Image (cartoon, coloured by chain):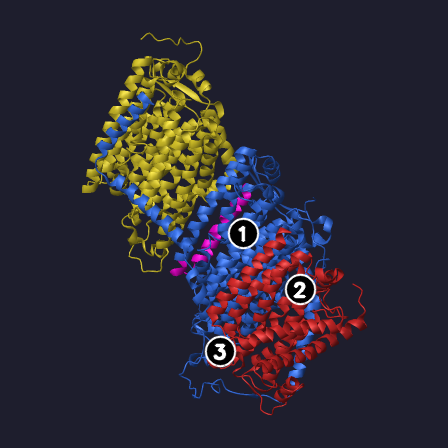
């Protein structure tokens, strides 16, 4: 069974969905979830296959690397595929809107995101990145309200400019090395890409993909978009899309630019993202904007984690990514009822008890209170930063700790307001919002109970993902000629 | 060290069961009694564990539990040592009495009782987890659980309590990140986080590193203890907590910081090392630093308490000050000093809880704790007066109560160690305490009875019995201090200090001994003789409070003939200008800086010129690449 | 500990009685000195005792409540207990079981009793008096504690019998006043403040607060306060003699030394007016404290 199915089926489904819903409303309503269920099944089987047989490589069309397109899946990628499918089903729009924009675009997003996770060469990554981007522009604007359309346009302009820069960077790499296959580049990078030209290419790629990865300073679109788009779209963007953009940057970093000063750039960018995100969140007066800034900060932490080379950095980054992937969409689901100015939330805990408890739990996990998973993620990050034993990394760790206090301040401020004794005018959360949020929260809670084996498994996954020589060996087996004539 | 598995498991499971049951029983009256009973069972388990310590050779025993985990290469283990056992007894005892007090008439017609009992149960469980931590990471997990449990118990009333609790949680989070930084630094350098490895590593680590680790740990733990300069949050937070819960917090909550600090400073780093680490350009060393922090913590909060007009704030500030005595005794690190510091933890818990419960009784009947509005209640509430009297004698550290014994031991250890200035500082604290607690009892119970309190009744038996029992415990452990000294001996062994030779009545040493059995007995007999002389005379006739010298005026009920406001006016004229509030200024400054930076960050994101940012970033990045 | 119960019992009974008798004599001495300086004859020999008997025997005894009674009982009882711990020539009492620090704190129990008793009198004059008394205690105890700390460190023990033994072992040159003169001066001044006589009489202040704590005390209550004064004068002077003047080798020199201390105090008292509260605090925290700190520094340097 080919990995292409994971991408092809959702996209095909997206095209078929409008036609089917025209024919029959019921079928239209069911078709989307069916496609996602199929995808979920595929992702599960991929996970099982990879766990039993190790990471897999698939050459599309039979063309071998480094000329052909390669799909590589290891355990972490399999988790990402699962996460994409699960998130899409949890964040599936409540009612079928007419026109049928949101479901269609969600399916496209699912397929494109899966492709992004699987791709193993720069151009394919770019193609799926653009596809994801187009789907997200549409999703942001799908509510057709004034602010969301303006936000979508600004987002589009910035993202398109970023994509153009990323393409420039990719072209630069191609012109130097003659190939876009990550494994091949990993082999030739130390000789060809270590000079200023190679580093400029990295900078362009970082800035370009950094738009979607919510890195400072090209993340100014984030608060606007998250505040004006529908909560579920924001949840998808912050939970899934931003992670995948970060994974793209990670792939480039650890294969092509390992052991260069690119790590330092990542650290600085991550640090600035973290600090600006937490401080702006402290100041935010709108619930969704606060979540947006918190999301920015968490991605800054991921960037800081990935700037540490080796298993420790990858482990920390994976932990934070997975934790944020579960926590933030749950918070955005709560924001469906609680979005808007923070003053509206006075006493909301008494009208929506479960929602408040869930918020408390997620807030504690984000701040990093043991034994919740958020603490272990921060612990791993701090261990990775301290383990690097350079003064800038110590400074980054200190900044991380200080911003934790600020994070506690703004999250507990909201919690205090929630529990204030006042008649709340807010309606309680509906089941359609609470149930997916509880599923996500529940998963986080369960992970506390199985923390030890989960941690061990994650360490193993990080170790295998960090093993670049094995990766190169898998994608470019020894008996295939590696020289390319430029 | 032999391990006795099983007992600790039972204890932790019972504590967990308490949480579940108190949650399930909701607002029913039986909830309080059920909780009290469960705390009694936990105390019983602890006593059974304590019976293993009967011989001095068994003082280093560890009680292990089956709770272990391995996270990312760290082996987390929970086992209780003698030090943890000592603090655990105090914790569960304090919870028992607070819950007993709250179980009876106090909780009638009061809503929020479920949260009250659940919060206390969560606190007890998390404290037991902290006290049985066997390595640094499990210590941190326990520490954070305790911090957040305290937040829960402080914030339950809402309103002003929630604001005070918010301030607390910010301080607590700042402390927690400092501790986490120290732990991860140790993990990186020492390779593992269990106590043995850390101790061996620290013994040969360079001084600069040990300074950093020590300061990080100490700042985190001192925030919980509310030592100066981290003292601003505790009084408001403790005084806003509902009465019995405030008694529990005041008794033991901040001592968790002392427990952790004792482990890190005395057990892991070691006093010899602390004396070795000198502060550059001065003749001081690290131990002197902590001794003086403790001394200032004794003086400053005590004199802040002197100016308070709310009885609960006054008691809360004294609680902070007494913590300084405990730290002082432990940092002197002689057998006498450490025993004194540890005993003071127990003693303070007994009389602080009694005092808080007495004040809560007054609030229950009169509706106010404002010292300028009360007075003369001794005839209406004699039992509460008795409790408060026992409590303030203990707090002031006068014979015959237990507070005197532990303070005597701290004073003696300071003099034996040739530290007269610290001795002076601790006595100044005691003197300030005497002034302040006299004001407390005078403004509440003595003086003129107001018209509106003429019909105030004594509190019901369900409330007066627990507080009288606490006062009784303070008296009995003052009479027979050997009881508490026996309990503190295992704790002292864990800290690595030589045991203190003592007997049931106190301490016998060549340079000055204390035998409380004799002292208290003679005091009682003498007072008896005084009573004989007194009652042997002519009969006295009781007169009304308005039959009083008033310079020729006739007193009436609407004339307020009571001196309570600005009780120490003369003293305040001298020391009033010395209260500058500099630490408050520091706190406000930090908040302002955060607000300013947050506004800056927000300003960046409000900008609509996103493309400009993009351009700027590209140019900057490429410039760095080309020329960097 | 091996204790001869009979001797102990005799000591326990005798020491308070001795303290009372000597205290009466000292009070008489104070009144005589004052009279002579004021060019009067002064009261007859037994006057202090007559005063107490007269007060005790009054028909009308008013009380404001049980705590007032209890307070006065604590005043007398507390001092009886304190005297047992103060060694005199020939009788060590309980000095083995309680040291200098215990003694100082035991001497605070009567003050607490007085404070409680006055509290129930419900008279603001009394409460103000107690507030002033506590304030002046804070003021004079600071130099006093410095002196005590210095003495204990110099002698190396806080056991009073040991201190006396050390001083008597070396003759005049090993007396406290010779070994630590500055501390002796500071101790003298703070002892006088402890007596509560002019210029530190702020807690009684007849002209301002109607004698403060004594405003509602009459009959046996006032008599108990008189008894307290006897004990207090005795205790303060004996403590000073024990710490600095070599204790008592025999009763004759002992009484002489005590009388000398009280004589100087009474002379000073008669001449000076009364300090205001804040002036008293400031003065006590400046001069005696400064002298004592200097003395302490010298002791620590040794």
- Where, by quadrant of the figure, is residue A394 drawn? top left
**Left or right of residue C253: residue A204:** left
Task: Give, as a single range, the part of the protein colored magenta.
Answer: B137-162
The residue positioned farthest toward the left in the image shown: A146
CB within 8 Å, label 2 to label 1: no
- How crowded pointer 1 is (Cα within 10 Å; few <14, some 14-19, many 20+) is rated as some
Q: In the picture, which chain is yellow? A: A
Magenta includes B468? no
Q: Quickly name the residue at label 2.
A: C244
Q: In the picture, which chain is blue? A: B
Cα separation between marks 2 and 3: 41 Å
CB within 8 Å, label 2 to label 3: no
Q: Nearer the viewer, residue C96 or A128?
A: C96
- At 63% from the left and 50% from the top, the residue drawn is B333
Residue A82 location, x and y as percent? 39, 32
* Chain for numbered disc 2: C
Quarter of the image containing the N terminus of chain B? Answer: top right
Q: Quickly name the residue at label 1.
A: B292
Count of numbered marks: 3
Q: Nearer the viewer, residue B150 or B508?
A: B508
* Chain for numbered disc 1: B
Give above or below for A113 relative to B148.
above
Give above or below for A179 relative to B593.
above
Name the mark on residue B447. Answer: 3
């Amino acid at each position: 069974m080919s990995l292409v199915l994971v991408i092809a089926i959702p996209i095909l489904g997206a095209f078929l969905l409008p036609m089917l819903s025209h024919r029959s409303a019921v079928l239209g309503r069911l078709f989307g979830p069916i496609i996602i269920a199929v995808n979920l099944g595929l992702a599960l089987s991929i996970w099982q296959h990879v766990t039993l047989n190790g990471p897999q490589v698939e050459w599309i069309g039979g063309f071998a690397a480094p000329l052909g397109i390669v799909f590589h899946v290891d355990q972490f990628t399999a988790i990402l595929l699962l996460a994409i499918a699960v998130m899409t089903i949890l964040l599936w729009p409540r009612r079928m809107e007419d026109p049928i924009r949101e479901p269609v675009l969600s399916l496209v997003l699912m397929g494109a995101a899966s492709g992004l996770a699987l791709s193993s060469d720069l151009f394919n990554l770019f193609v799926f990145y653009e596809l994801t981007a187009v789907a997200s522009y549409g999703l942001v604007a799908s509510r057709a309200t004034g602010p969301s359309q303006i936000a979508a346009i600004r987002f589009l302009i910035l993202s398109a400019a970023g994509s153009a820069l990323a393409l420039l960077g990719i072209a630069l790499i191609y012109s130097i090395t003659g190939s876009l296959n990550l494994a091949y580049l990993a082999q030739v990078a130390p000789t060809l890409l270590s000079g200023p030209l190679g580093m400029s290419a990295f900078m362009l790629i970082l800035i370009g993909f950094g738009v979607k990865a919510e890195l400072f300073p090209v993340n100014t679109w984030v608060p606007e978009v998250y505040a004006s788009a529908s909560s579920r779209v924001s949840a998808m963007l912050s939970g899934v899309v931003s992670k995948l953009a970060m994974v793209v940057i990670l792939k480039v970093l650890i294969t092509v630019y390992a052991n260069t000063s690119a790590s330092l750039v990542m650290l600085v960018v991550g640090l600035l993202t973290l600090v600006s995100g937490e401080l702006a969140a402290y100041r935010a007066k709108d619930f969704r904007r606060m979540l947006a800034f918190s999301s920015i900060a968490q991605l800054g932490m991921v960037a800081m984690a990935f700037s540490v080379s080796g298993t420790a950095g990858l482990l920390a980054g994976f932990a934070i990514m997975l934790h944020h992937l579960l926590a933030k969409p749950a918070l955005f689901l709560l924001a469906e009822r609680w979005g808007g100015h923070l003053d509206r939330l006075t006493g909301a805990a008494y009208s929506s008890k479960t929602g408040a408890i869930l918020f408390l739990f997620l807030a504690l996990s984000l701040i990093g209170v043991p034994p919740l998973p958020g603490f272990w993620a921060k612990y791993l990050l701090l261990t990775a930063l301290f383990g690097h034993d350079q003064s800038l990394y110590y400074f980054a760790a200190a900044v991380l700790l200080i911003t934790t206090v600020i994070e506690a301040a703004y999250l507990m401020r909201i919690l205090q307001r929630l529990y204030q004794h006042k008649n709340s005018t807010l309606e309680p959360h509906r089941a359609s919002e609470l149930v997916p949020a509880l599923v996500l929260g529940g998963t986080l809670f369960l992970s506390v109970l199985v923390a030890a084996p989960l941690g061990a498994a994650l360490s193993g996954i990080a170790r295998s993902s960090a093993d670049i020589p094995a990766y190169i060996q898998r994608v470019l087996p020894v008996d295939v000629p590696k020289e390319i004539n430029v | 060290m032999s391990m006795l598995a099983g007992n600790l498991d039972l204890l932790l499971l019972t504590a967990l069961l308490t949480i579940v049951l108190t949650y399930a029983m909701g607002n029913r009256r039986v909830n309080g009694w059920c909780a009290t009973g469960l705390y009694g069972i936990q105390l019983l388990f602890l006593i059974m564990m304590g019976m293993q310590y009967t011989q001095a050779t068994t003082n280093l025993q560890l009680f292990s539990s089956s709770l272990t985990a391995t996270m990312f290469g760290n082996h987390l283990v929970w086992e209780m040592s003698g030090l943890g056992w000592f603090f655990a007894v105090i914790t569960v005892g304090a919870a028992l009495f607070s819950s007993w007090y709250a179980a009876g008439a106090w909780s009638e017609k009061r809503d929020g009782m479920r949260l009250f009992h659940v919060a206390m149960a969560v606190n007890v469980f998390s404290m037991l987890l902290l006290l049985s931590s066997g390595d640094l990471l499990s210590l941190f997990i326990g520490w954070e659980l305790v911090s957040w449990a305290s937040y829960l118990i402080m914030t339950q009333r809402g309103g002003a309590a929630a604001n005070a609790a918010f301030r607390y949680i910010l301080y607590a989070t700042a402390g927690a990140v400092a501790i986490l930084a120290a732990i991860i630094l140790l993990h990186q350098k020492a390779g593992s986080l269990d106590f043995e490895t850390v101790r061996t590593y620290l013994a040969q680590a360079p001084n600069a590193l040990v300074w950093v680790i020590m300061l990080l740990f100490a700042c985190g733990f001192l925030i919980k203890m509310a030592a100066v300069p981290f003292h601003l949050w505790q009084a408001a937070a403790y005084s806003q907590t509902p009465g019995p819960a405030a008694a529990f917090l005041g008794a033991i909550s901040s001592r968790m910081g002392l427990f952790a600090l004792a482990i890190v400073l005395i057990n892991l780093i070691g006093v010899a090392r602390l004396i070795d680490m000198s502060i550059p350009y001065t003749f001081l060393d690290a131990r002197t630093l902590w001794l003086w922090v403790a001394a200032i913590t004794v003086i400053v909060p005590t004199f802040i308490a002197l100016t308070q007009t709310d009885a609960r704030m006054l008691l809360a500030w004294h609680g902070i000050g007494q913590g300084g005595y405990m730290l002082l005794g432990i940092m002197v690190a002689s057998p006498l000093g450490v025993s004194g510091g540890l005993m003071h933890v127990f003693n303070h818990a007994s009389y602080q809880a009694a005092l808080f419960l007495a004040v809560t009784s007054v609030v229950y009947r009169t509706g106010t704790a404002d010292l300028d509005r009360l007075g003369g209640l001794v005839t209406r509430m004699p039992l509460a007066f008795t409790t408060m009297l026992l409590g303030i004698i203990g707090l002031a550290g006068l014979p015959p109560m237990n507070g005197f014994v532990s303070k005597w031991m701290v004073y003696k250890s300071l003099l034996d160690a040739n530290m007269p200035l610290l001795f002076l500082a601790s006595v100044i604290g005691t003197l300030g305490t005497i002034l302040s607690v006299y004001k407390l009892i005078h403004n509440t119970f003595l003086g003129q009875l107001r018209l509106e309190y003429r019909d105030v009744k004594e509190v019901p038996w369900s409330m007066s019995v627990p507080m009288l029992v606490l006062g009784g415990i303070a008296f009995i452990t003052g009479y027979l201090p050997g009881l508490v000294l026996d309990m503190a001996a295992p704790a002292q062994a864990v800290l690595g200090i030589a045991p203190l030779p003592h007997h049931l009545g106190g301490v016998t040493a060549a340079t000055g001994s204390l035998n409380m059995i004799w002292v208290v007995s003679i005091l009682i007999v003498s007072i008896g003789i005084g009573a004989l002389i007194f009652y042997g005379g002519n009969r006295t006739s009781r007169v009304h409070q308005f039959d009083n010298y008033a310079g020729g005026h006739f007193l009436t009920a609407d004339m307020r003939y009571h001196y309570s406001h600005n009780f120490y006016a003369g003293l305040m004229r001298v020391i009033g200008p010395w209260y500058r509030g500099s630490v408050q200024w520091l706190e406000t400054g930090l908040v302002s800086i955060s607000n300013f930076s947050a506004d800056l960050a927000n300003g960046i994101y409000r900008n609509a010129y996103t493309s400009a940012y993009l351009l700027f970033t590209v140019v900057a990045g490429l410039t760095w690449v080309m020329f960097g | 500990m091996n204790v001869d119960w009979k001797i102990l019992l005799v000591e326990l009974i005798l020491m308070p009685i001795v303290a009372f008798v000597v205290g009466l004599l000292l009070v008489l001495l104070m009144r005589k000195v004052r009279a002579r300086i004021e060019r009067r004859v002064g009261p007859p020999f037994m006057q202090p005792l007559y005063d107490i008997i007269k007060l005790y025997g009054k028909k009308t005894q008013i009380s404001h409540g049980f705590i007032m009674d209890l307070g006065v009982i604590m005043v007398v009882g507390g001092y009886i207990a304190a005297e047992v711990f103060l060694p005199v020539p020939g009788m060590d009492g309980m000095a083995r079981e309680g040291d200098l620090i215990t003694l100082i704190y035991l001497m605070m129990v009567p003050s607490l009793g007085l404070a409680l008793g006055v509290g129930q009198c419900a008279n603001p004059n009394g409460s103000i008096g107690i507030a002033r008394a506590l304030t002046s205690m804070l003021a004079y105890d600071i130099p006093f504690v410095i002196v005590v700390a210095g003495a204990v460190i110099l002698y190396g023990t806080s056991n009073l019998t040991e201190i006396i033994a050390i001083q008597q072992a070396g003759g005049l040159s090993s007396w406290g006043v010779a070994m630590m003169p500055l501390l002796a001066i500071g101790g003298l001044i703070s002892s006088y403040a402890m007596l509560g006589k002019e210029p530190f009489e702020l807690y009684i202040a007849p002209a301002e607060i109607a004698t403060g704590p004594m405003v509602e005390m009459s009959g046996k209550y006032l008599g108990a306060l008189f008894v307290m004064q006897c004990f207090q004068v005795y205790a303060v002077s004996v403590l000073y003699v024990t710490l600095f003047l070599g204790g008592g080798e025999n009763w004759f020199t002992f009484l002489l030394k005590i009388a000398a201390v009280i004589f100087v105090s009474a002379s000073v008292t008669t001449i000076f007016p009364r300090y205001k509260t804040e002036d008293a605090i400031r003065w006590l925290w400046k001069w005696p404290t400064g002298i004592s700190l200097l003395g302490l520094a010298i002791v620590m340097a040794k």
